[in-house]
Amino acid sequence: MSGGELPVRVILSGPLMDEAEEKEVGSLIVVEATNRHDVEEFSRNDPYRKAGLVGAILILPWRWTRGNPDRRN
């Protein structure tokens, strides 16, 4: 990321649904960040997490290939 940008940028997000697509069972948030520490801090400051509405949290690296505007697909 270039100077002046926030350390974590949300790329996309939305609810994860059950098989019948009737009930929300979680959330998916894809972010851009330079390091894991910034992502963990971003997660700790999430309003839903602060309100105790978040259960398990899984942070994994992701390599964006198809559809990435910075790559030729």
Image (spheres, helix red, strand yellow):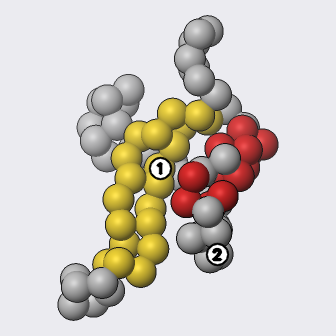
Report the front residue among 25 and 45.
45
Numbered circle sitting on residue 30: 1
Q: Secondary structure at mark 2?
A: loop
Q: Does residue 41 lie above or below 28 as drawn? A: above
Residue 39 appears in the picture as rendered: no
Instruction: Classify mark 1: helix, strand or loop.
Output: strand
Q: Residue at x 37, y 72 (%)?
A: 16
Which quadrant of the figure has residue 27?
A: bottom left
Q: Quadrant of residue 11?
A: top left
**At label 1, which amino acid type do we have?**
Val
Instruction: Locate residue 38: give its quadrant.
Output: top right
Q: CA distance from mark 1 to mark 2?
A: 16 Å
Q: Is 18 displayed left or right of 47 in the figure?
A: left
- Picture quarter with the C terminus: top left
Q: Residue furthest bottom?
A: 20
Closer to the chain start, of discs 1 and 2, is 1
Residue flagged by tag 2: what amino acid is it?
Ala
Q: Is residue 43 left or right of residue 27?
A: right
Relative to 11, is 4 on the left or the right? right
* Residue 69 place in picture, x, y as percent: 31, 29
Q: Residue furthest top?
A: 3
Identify which residue is drawn at 71% across, 52% down: 44
- The residue at 56%/17% (across/down) is 5
Residue 52 image position (x, y, % from top left): 64, 69
Circle 2 residue: 56
Residue found at x 65% / y 52%: 43
Please, which residue is most extreme toward the right here?
37
Front-lying residue, 34 or 28:
28
- Quadrant of image for the N terminus: top right
